[in-house]
Every structure is written in structure tokens, then in C-alpha cells.
Amino acid sequence: MRAIGVFGGAFAPFHNGHLRVAIEARERLDLTQVRLIPTAHAAHRPDSRVSPQRRLEWLRAAVRREKALVPDDREILRDGVSYTVDTLEELRRDFPRAALVLLMGADAFEHFHTWNRWQQIVELAHIAVIARPGSALQLSAETREVLEGRRTDSVAALHEQTAGLWLPLEFPPLDISATRIRRLLAQQRSVRGLVPDAILNTMTAADIAALTQDNDATKH
Ligand code: ATP
């Protein structure tokens, strides 16, 4: 059965850590494509000062040459709070016979039990959790209870059913976060090597000002 990766985030900005997650997951999990989905309005954090449209443009520029990485604007078109469960329900309708694999960093997975209708997410997709510097692979008690007996280390198993399993995905981690990138920009330091050149080369002063304000808002 074919399997499709689903990778969402604020992507403010999309960076090389995100890019490696998408590429490594595609290759290691044998995914036919990875859909990259910028959030319109995240549930747990203030909106980025960078518009969803601009974040999508960055994403498109970054993966233009990567045929299997597909920018997906469904959360932007839907508007309202961007709940992953709604996105997965739509994708399930679009791809009724494919396995869906939700990709998330260990930091996101730690709070998984606070996501809207999170138990349903496990019925709609598999979950692949990617180690991230500074975040141990930790399941909350609630998540552990629901995911009990669903862990696998087998890529083949992900292709045998459309949803319902979780798998830790290990590859050399990149210690890159959007927060650090925004902080460097605020200090007028270079972020080359952290952000794809295709994004950096079109970043305007207004973009940088908006990203800098994001950090003030989240008080990182
Ligand atoms: P911020 O610093 O603003 O929180 P971020 O770098 O964590 O941003 P997001 O857009 O919030 O990026 O993250 C989207 C998804 O990408 C999350 O699941 C997050 O865990 C994952 N992710 C981001 N950077 C990495 C990385 N370097 N390695 C593995 N996963 C990552």
C-alpha cells in the first residue's frame, strides 16, 4: 500500500531542519510524497506576523526541485484554527486507500495529548516521531495509554494498514529551530546554512521585521 507523509508547522520560516525531516522521512519510510502544510492559525501559539501566504511562498521556493515534497495550502484555504485532525480527515477523503504518516518532532509529540480530538488522529494516520536536540522522546501518561501496543519499528508495517501505529524515526538530528533563526535575524546575524538559499535570497526587510516581532510575541 502506498504511504503519504503529512508534515505541518508554522514554518516561520521553513528551515533546513524541516527540509531534512521531510527528505529523510520520505526515503526511510518509503513515502510516495510528503505534504508540507503551513498552519493558518495554530491552536497553541500566537499567529506569526508573517502571513500564511508568504510562509507558503517560502515553502514553495524551498522545495521547487523536490518533486516528492508537496506544499499543501489546505489549512490556509480553510482558515479558522488549523486543527491537524481536520486536515487528516480531508486527506483521508482525498486518499482513501493510502496509509497516512503524520510526521512530528519529539517536542510536538510531548504535547500530543493536548491536541484537538487527538485520539482520533491515531485512527486517521500513523505517527512518526523525529528526535530533536533538546527534546527526549517522551510520551505523556495520556498518550502512552492510548498508544499502548501501537509502537512499531517496522517500515513494512506502516504500509500494511492505513493508520494506527507509531514509530520513532532516527536520523542525524539538525539543531535548527525557527526561534533561533528569528533571534539571529533580530541580532542582524546571518542565517545562511540554516534556511534554504531559495528563501533567504528573496527575504525582504519587511519579512525580517515580521519574523523578529514573532519572537517578541512568544517571549522565547
Ligand atoms: P519554533 O522555534 O518557532 O517553535 P520550529 O523550528 O519548532 O519553530 P515549527 O514550524 O514550529 O518549527 O515545527 C513544525 C514541526 O517541525 C514540529 O513537529 C517540530 O517538532 C518539527 N521540527 C522543527 N525543527 C525540527 C528539527 N530541527 N528536527 C526535527 N523536527 C523539527
Image (tube, helix red, strand yellow):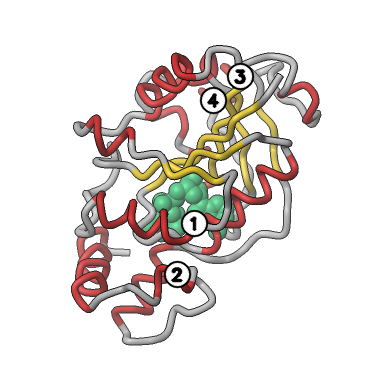
Q: Cα distance, mark 1 to mark 4?
A: 36 Å
Look at label 1 and name its amino acid.
Answer: Arg
Look at label 3 and name its amino acid.
Answer: Ala
Look at label 4 and name its amino acid.
Answer: Thr
* Disc on the earlier residue, 2 or 1: 1
* Disc on the earlier residue, 4 or 3: 3
Q: Does residue 31 sit above or below 85 in this rendering?
A: below
Task: Determine the secondary structure under disc 3.
Answer: loop
Residue drawn 41% across the image and 54% down it: 60
* Disc on the earlier residue, 4 or 2: 4
Which residue is label 1 attached to? 64
Which residue is label 4 attached to? 143
- Which tag is nearer the camera, tag 4 or tag 3? 3
Which residue is label 2 attached to? 198
Q: Cα distance, mark 3 to mark 1?
A: 24 Å
Which residue is label 3 attached to? 98
Q: Cα distance, mark 2 to mark 3?
A: 31 Å
Q: Nearer the viewer, residue 172 or 31?
A: 31
The quarter of the displayed image where residue 187 is located: bottom left
Residue drawn 62% across the image and 21% down it: 99
Contact check, label 2 and label 1, Cβ < 8 Å: yes
